[in-house]
Image (tube, grey):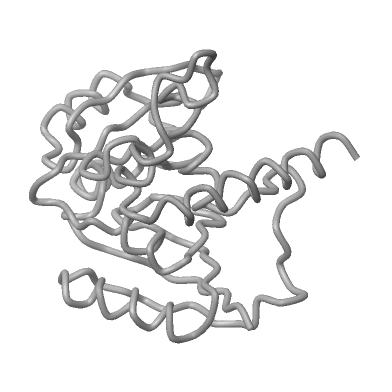
C-alpha cells in the first residue's frame, strides 16, 4: 500500500535552501523537476517576492544553484528555471526518484520547504527519511497516511515523477525526432536505470497521457 508523507525539510544545503534562509518572506512553489544531467537536476519554480532584483542577487550567491533563468512573470509570481549545483548540495531529487517517490506538492517559505509526497510503501519513505537525516537535513514530520483511495493524483497530472522525467529527457534529447538524435541506451544511462526500465517508463507514460487526453 502506498504512503502519503507530509513534512518540512530545513537545510541550507537543499536546493535553494540558502535563498530561503536569506529571504524569509519569499515564497517558492515547485512546478516540476527533471534531470537531463543527473548531476544537475532542473526545477521550475514560481517565486513570489516584492524585490526581484534582491531575489536574483541572492540566487547569484546561492551555492546550491548552478544557473537560473527567468521564464515568465505575472502580477504576483515569476517563473524561474533553476539548474542545481553539482557540489555542496543534498542530492534529494535523485534519492526520492530512485525510491519510487512522487512529489505532490512542494512550497518553500519562511526558510523551509513544506513537502507532500507519495511513496510506494513505508519502507521506501523510511529509506528516504534516513537519507535526509544522514545529510543533516532537519525533518519535521506532519503526517503519514495510507495513499490508496486518498489524495488521488491530480487530474491535470496523470504521470508519475519517474515517467515524467523519462518522457521529458527523451523529448529534449531528440528521441522522438525523425531521425532520432539519441538512443534508448543513452537515456537509460542518464537516468541510471536499465534499457528495459526506461522503455517501460516511456510506454506507460505515453499510455497514461493518451488515456488522460484522448478518452
- Quadrant, the N terminus: bottom right
Does residue 116 appear to the left or right of 157 in the view shown? left
- Residue 163: percent from left, percent from top: 55, 49
**Which residue: 52% across, 72% down?**
119
Closest to the observer, 124 or 140: 124
Residue at (33, 37) in percent of width and height: 186
User: Where 26 sits versus 176, above or below?
Assistant: below
Residue 50 visible? yes
Residue at image coords 54%, 75%: 120
Answer with the quarter of the image where residue 91 lies: bottom left
x%, y% of residue 18?
18, 46
Across and down, in percent, residue 45 comes to 42, 35
20 vs 148, left or right, is left
- Vertical comparison of 171 with 2: above or below: above
Picture quadrant of residue 212: top right
- Residue furthest to the right in view is 215
- Taking 181 as reference, is 213 left or right? right
- Residue 214 versus residue 155: which sits nearer the camera? 214
Query: Which quadrant of the structure image shows residue 105?
Result: bottom right
x then y, percent, for residue 169:
43, 34
Give the quadrant of the C terminus.
top right
Amino acid at each position: 500500500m502506498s504512503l502519503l508523507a507530509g513534512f518540512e525539510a530545513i537545510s541550507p544545503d537543499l536546493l535553494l535552501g540558502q535563498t530561503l534562509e536569506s529571504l524569509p518572506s519569499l515564497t517558492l512553489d515547485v512546478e516540476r523537476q527533471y534531470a537531463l544531467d543527473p548531476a544537475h537536476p532542473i526545477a521550475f519554480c514560481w517565486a513570489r517576492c516584492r524585490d526581484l532584483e534582491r531575489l536574483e542577487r541572492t540566487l547569484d550567491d546561492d551555492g546550491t544553484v548552478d544557473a537560473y533563468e527567468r521564464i515568465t512573470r505575472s502580477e504576483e509570481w515569476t517563473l524561474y528555471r533553476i539548474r542545481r549545483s553539482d557540489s555542496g548540495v543534498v542530492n534529494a531529487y535523485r534519492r526520492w526518484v530512485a525510491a519510487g517517490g512522487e512529489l505532490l506538492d512542494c512550497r518553500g517559505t519562511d526558510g523551509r520547504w513544506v513537502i507532500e509526497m507519495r511513496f510506494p510503501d513505508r519502507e521506501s519513505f523510511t529509506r528516504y527519511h534516513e537519507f535526509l537525516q544522514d545529510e543533516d537535513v532537519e525533518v519535521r514530520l506532519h503526517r503519514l497516511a495510507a495513499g490508496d483511495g486518498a489524495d488521488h493524483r491530480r487530474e491535470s497530472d496523470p504521470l508519475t515523477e519517474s515517467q515524467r522525467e523519462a518522457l521529458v529527457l527523451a523529448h529534449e534529447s531528440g528521441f522522438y525526432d525523425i531521425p532520432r538524435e539519441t538512443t534508448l541506451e543513452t537515456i537509460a544511462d542518464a537516468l541510471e536505470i536499465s534499457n528495459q526500465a526506461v522503455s517501460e517508463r516511456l510506454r506507460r507514460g505515453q499510455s497514461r497521457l493518451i488515456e488522460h487526453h484522448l478518452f
